[in-house]
Image (cartoon, grey):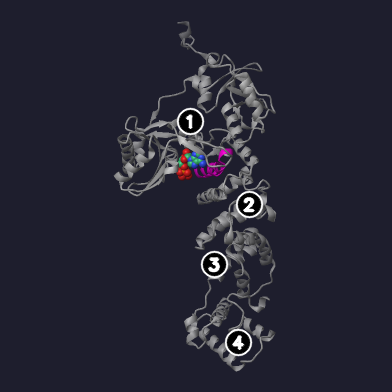
Amino acid sequence: MSALRRGKYPQVEPGAISLMHRAVAMCPSGLTVREALALVRRRHVRLLAVRDRGMFGLILPRDLIRAQALGLETRRAGDVAWRGIPAVTPGATEVTVRRHLLEGARAVLVREGRKLAGAIEPSAAALSRPALSLLPRLERQLPREMLGLLHQIGLAAESVGVRAYAVGGFVRDFLLGREAAELDIAVEGDGLALARRLASELGSRLVVHATFQTASLEGGGPVRIDVATAREERYREPGALPEVRPASLSQDLLRRDFSINAMALVLSPAGFGDLLDPLRGSADLARRRIRILHQLSFVEDPTRIFRAVRYQTRLGLTLDHNTRRALRLAADIGDYPALSGQRLTAELELVLTESAATQALLSLGRLGAFRILDQSYRFSPSAAKRVGDLGSLLRWLREHSIPLDVLALSLLALLAHLSREVAERCLKRLALAGEPLSRLTAALREAAVLARKLATQPQAPPSSRASLLRAHSLETLGGAWLAGAGRARREIEWFLAEGRATRPLLGGDDLLALGVAPGPRIGQLLDRLRDRRLDGVTATRDQELTLVRKWLLRAQASPAQPMGKASEGAWAAPSDNRPTALPAQRLGGGVGRGAKPPSEK
Ligand code: ATP
């Protein structure tokens, strides 16, 4: 009665002390992974705690084992610690403890004064809540065809004796109210049996990857479906592809990249629509944050760094503190010989398909992610400026329907500030080879020089300006645009939008009809006509016909004229109302199509 009067109900509050275990020890700072593991074994503890600037951190023995398996036993154990672990007094209420755990804390530490007394892990706080049913929301939010497909998958799974779950991006995007472009299904049991069954029911095209126990189905439904047998993964080397083996759904969720991608939706009829979220991805989505599932996640698979930044920019999320630390650790370790350049390039290309691609590149640069390409890589303010400008360049190119290699341009923006050796090492690390590599290497060498030249060159007729730019690849022009400003950029834009596209109004057939013999001289004459058009000397077909006739007459009149300076000058005269002395043999001579007019030599 007195408790009620004070506004409190008498209740049994277990409190922190009754939830904690004492199998936790302080890990002296500076201990290596190997030494910390020895400490765990010697003291028979389940957790190690570290202190960092007044805060507690936590080292999980399984992360130490992971680090050892990855060959990192001489690194500091503190590198794999979760930081910002909440600490409570023994008298703290269970509600307080549960709140910390529900917010995603790996554990709650209990301290008496400055002394560590124990730790409470999620299992002790009875956190396994009943699965939340999303059925009403599924029925409200999903198009009828999609909802029908999910039911059909669940029934098909039941008929082949397996359990099916929608996982990954589909669940994440559903919770965010976004439409997913594909549907990932994880299967407890034989995933391929379900894939075959579905393909025959839906009439989809089925592609099976037996080694990975995965299959994809295209056609026959509203979205592409990827089916995978639930699995666990083990990484033997940083960046290497993992060894996989069939596992339960919980283990499958644990091997995923981020908590927001580690949720599952039950599709089997019993429990259809239940959300399984053991790693609290929905709480992270609500708090708009990306959280890795263990501190070595990026070391195991550095391509996850690119994935993290893709989600960050696409969904407007932020990387949580421990995720940033894990990323720095992975960038520090660097190198990753087991990670192929092709995989890295593929990830970079995926980043570039995002609508906020340049924003993502900026994030990657600022986070130090490109040190994975080469440990000497530094993202300087000038690189940030180029990447910032890249967005405008790409927009301009798209508006003018100029197809340009986005990967190449991005690499120019990212690498132009580096020394030649470092930039070339980065390109090789991305497994670029052959023609694309040599074009990019040349662009890195020439772009800044070209930009300077364009900014300072004296006024020249359009044909000369076009000729200077025509001698460079599109990569070099893009690189020079990024390296330059004002006048240099305007010159390149003019060339790409106008100069490059200008053609003579006459064609090869017209020249043949005028009596020009077949051969290289046709191309040369067409180039000359194009230049006259660029310079505004000709504007109509008739003017071009007249001009060619004059050239031919002049060539006939002085067939033996040597190819000296005088005739070269006549070739390139910008104003061509006067007849140009064109020696016949010069027409068929060694100057190739696109050669520089003498005015530039
Ligand atoms: P997106 O919309 O970008 O396609 P997604 O989540 O569907 O996002 P996928 O690349 O199709 O991404 O991968 C499907 C799921 O597989 C992810 O949600 C994630 O759970 C898991 N996954 C993919 N790549 C990795 C990886 N490198 N490491 C761990 N898990 C991964």
Q: Tell me the residue that label 2 is attached to.
A: 426
Q: Which amino acid, mark 1?
A: Arg
Left or right of 352: which side holds 129? left
> Between disc 4 and disc 2, whose residue precedes?
2
Q: Tell me the residue that label 4 is attached to.
A: 585
Q: Which mark is residue 497?
A: 3
Q: Which amino acid, mark 3?
A: Ala
Q: Quadrant of the N terminus?
A: top left
Left or right of 20: which side holds 32? right
> Residue 135: x, y in percent?
35, 33
Mark 3 neighbour density, 10 Å: few (under 14) some (14–19) many (20 or more):
some
Q: Which amino acid, mark 2?
A: Cys
> Between disc 1 and disc 3, whose residue precedes?
1
Q: CA distance from mark 2 to mark 1?
A: 37 Å
Q: Find the magenta span and give its range.
A: 299-315
> Between disc 3 and disc 4, whose residue precedes?
3
Viewer-nearest residue: 376 or 458: 376
Residue ranking furthest to the front? 211
> Residue 310: x, y in percent?
52, 45
> Between disc 2 and disc 3, whose residue precedes?
2
**Which residue corresponds to the image point at 66% horizontal and 66% vertical from the top-left?**
454
